[in-house]
Amino acid sequence: MSTIQCKINEILGAEISGIDLTRPASDATRAELNTLFSKHAVLVFRDQPLTPSQFMQAAEIFGSLMDQQIKKFVLPDYPLVGCNSTKDLPRKNGKLQVRGENYHTDHSNDIAPPKATSLLAVDIPSYGGDTQFVDVRRAYDDLSVRQQTAIQHLRSKHVHESSRSPRSFAKLSPEEMAKIPHTQQPLVIQHPISGRPALYLNTGRMEGIEGMNADEGFALIDQLYQHATQAKYEYRHQWRVGDMVIWDNRSVMHQANADYDPEEFRYLYRVMLQGDKLQPFVRIRTI
Ligand SMILES: [Fe+2]
């Protein structure tokens, strides 16, 4: 019988307890966790001080690990495990230039973007550095039927860095840039397991809307972004050492915060799970 307990957060996500992720999970536990994951989209596991290999094993409960795009930020002995360290961050006017300081979904310019991302907190500053998540399924659900119908068929070109990106990205070598794809993604996607529609937005990478002039396209993106990032869709995770958090990139957007003391050390491991090509949401008409 399962020992897993699931405490559902008020707005988004759930905290899972009664499991030791240092040990391999049974088939029944894996199935139960995957069901919870497709429903709640953000799962938090507290008090899991995992080694890199245990972290990989825990993340693999939810899918297959994929390569890290930026090879200079990986663990030398575990190339599938990225590391997010304050020591690697550039500074501007004394402020750390934190990657991901704007709501986004990871690698949305990939033809098959990662279906999930997971972080494990190894060192955490005494304050700040939370990760915020917003539920883009509920954001879509709350649009009027007229708005939903107007955007449902639209697509956007996602590139490495949009000409109107509100954030800057890691500078890549010409070899790395040559491997970076760009692709047209649906503006409204359908989750392959739950079937739920969701807005698919990434203002750092979206280069307008197909078939619209640039100003109209970017205005629509901005309008949807402002709608989807309201506090009523948000779960804010305050990190503790030993937290493992996994989120579904097809159901939520996330953002980092650079509001901690830059002299304090912050260090997390990161893995990503292989995803499939995104599917546009197709409404089934009822008569
Ligand atoms: Fe991210």
Image (tube, rainbow, N blue to C red):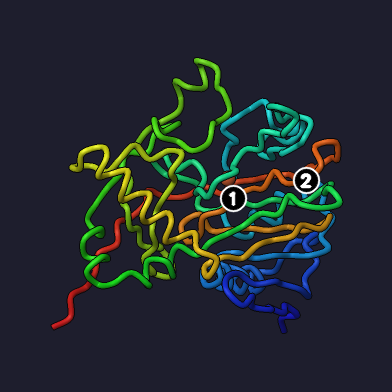
Instruction: Give the residue at mark 1.
Output: 255
Q: Is residue 5 left or right of residue 104?
A: right
Q: How crowded is mark 2: few (under 14 residues within 10 Å), some or many (20 or more)?
A: some
Q: Which residue is drawn at 62% across and 38% down?
A: 99
| Position of 162 relative to 48 (above/below) | above
Q: Is mark 2 within 8 Å of ligand 1?
A: no
On the image, the x and y values in percent for residue 145 come to 25, 72
Q: Residue at x 72, y 33 (%)?
A: 95
Q: In this view, does 85 lie to the left or right of 183?
A: right
Residue at far front of view: 93
On the image, the x and y values in percent for residue 204 come to 46, 39
Mark 2 vs mark 1: which is more N-terminal? Answer: 1
Mark 2 vs mark 1, foreground winner is 2
Q: Is residue 135 left or right of residue 271?
A: left
In the picture, which quadrant includes the C terminus? bottom left
In the picture, which quadrant includes the N terminus? bottom right
Q: Is mark 1 within 8 Å of ligand 1?
A: yes
Quarter of the image for residue 191 reads bottom left
Instruction: Give the residue at mark 2.
Output: 260
| Position of 26 relative to 4 (above/below) | above
